[in-house]
Amino acid sequence: MDFALIGAAGYIAPRHMKAIKAIGGDLKAVFDPSDSTGGVYSHFPKTNVFVEFERFSHHVDELKHRGKRIDYVSICSPTHLHDAHCGYALRSDADAICEKPIALNPSSLDALEEIEIDTGRRIFAIQQLRLHPAIEALKSKIAASPNSAFNVDVTYVTAREPWYHATWKADHAKSGGIVTNIGVHFIDALVHIFGPASLSIAHLRDPHRAAGFLVCGPANIRWFLSVGQDDLPPSSKGTTYRSITLDDEEIDLSNGLTDLHTRSYQEIVAGRGLGLRCVRHAIEIMSAFRTAPIELRRGERHPFVQRHSPANQRQPMQGLSLVAPILAEMDSPPT
């Protein structure tokens, strides 16, 4: 299997390189506008590295004309470029393996589905949290209790230094904001476990944090995401705190995270990869959240929300309405 890689200088690309090597693939071409891509050679010492997309594309075309077509293009570029790079991969007669999320808005997924039909190629998502042993066990537990209701709290705080806010990740038009940039795996996992959302309420949205309330199938979910150092609870170790509780029982995510990209690649080449339809519901939730009104008096608020709105005490749920029918209407560029 021959691979090309778009976006090699970021922190996530080495996990893709490791996965490609683990499944016996060969990395034939790499593109990144930065020249800080020397780490590629520790995995694939004969790889051709390009800092201009045109030269990278020309090289991929040459390989195809010589009968050495690229099988997969792995995409680790900034989020707002994912859909364009997926389209490029398909038009180059390759399948795409895309880092989270494939697109920022559902309308982009619609366009990519058309390109899949036109080219006969496929796009596969890296949503590796679905493969975490604790998430797999939780999904099995929920499936075995079809008539039960659940209360879920999701808390993810990953402190970022000031450099974070000077990068594309702090630009909502490029990253989709906190809810997408650091929350996509959790939201995707929740939809995977409990089912599509019937209700989504926004409680907090600023450059550092996002929080809200979801109803997914039988689960009432309070969630809180942050890149702020001051949001780390006293019990946290280091700069990251992850917690999912189901009816006050902690789901342990502390182990089993390191090789999930490799498992994702193994699933893809075995024909069990996650396609566009698998990730659509999570992208609909995130897209709608970006423009949803902040409604502190609706839904159940995550306890951490109180820190940033002290005058608003916890209120009982009232006036809940289904959000699924209006998700499509709220499909608009992130603001």
Image: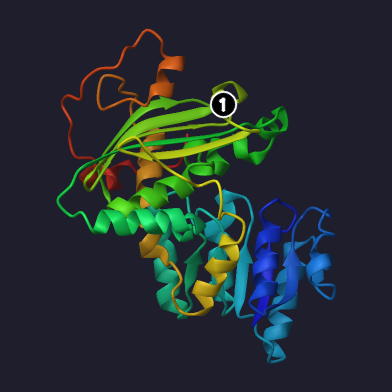
Considering every residue shown, the one lying at the far front of the view is: 249
Say which residue appears at 25% left-offset and 58% top-offset. Answer: 143
Q: Position of residue 322 (x, y in %)?
A: 19, 39
Inspect the image, locate mark 1, and give the three-letter code of the amino acid beneath it. Leu
Considering every residue shown, the one lying at the far top of the view is: 311
Count of labels in the image: 1
Determine the secondary structure under disc 1: loop
Decide: is 162 above or below 259.
above
Residue 96 shows in the view? yes
Q: Position of residue 245 (x, y in %)?
A: 38, 38
Say which residue appears at 49% left-offset and 69% top-offset. Answer: 123
Quarter assignment of residue 207: top right
Decide: is 150 above or below 264.
above
Q: Position of residue 262 (x, y in %)?
A: 60, 67
Say which residue appears at 46% left-offset and 38% top-offset. Answer: 243
Of residue 88 and residue 69, the one placed in the foreground of this image is 69
Decide: is 327 above or below 47.
above
Quadrant holding the N terminus: bottom right
Quarter assignment of residue 99: bottom right
Residue ID for mark 1: 232
Say which residue appears at 30% left-offset and 23% top-offset. Answer: 295
Q: Residues within 10 Å of mark 1 (few under 14, many from 20)?
A: many
How does the figure colour the protein chain or chains? rainbow
Of residue 58 and residue 85, the one placed in the foreground of this image is 85
Quarter assignment of residue 297: top left
Residue 192 shows in the view? no
Q: Position of residue 152 (x, y in %)?
A: 32, 38
**Side of 190 relative to 183 (left or right):** left
Of residue 231 and residue 120, the one placed in the foreground of this image is 231
**Side of 199 relative to 79 (left or right):** left
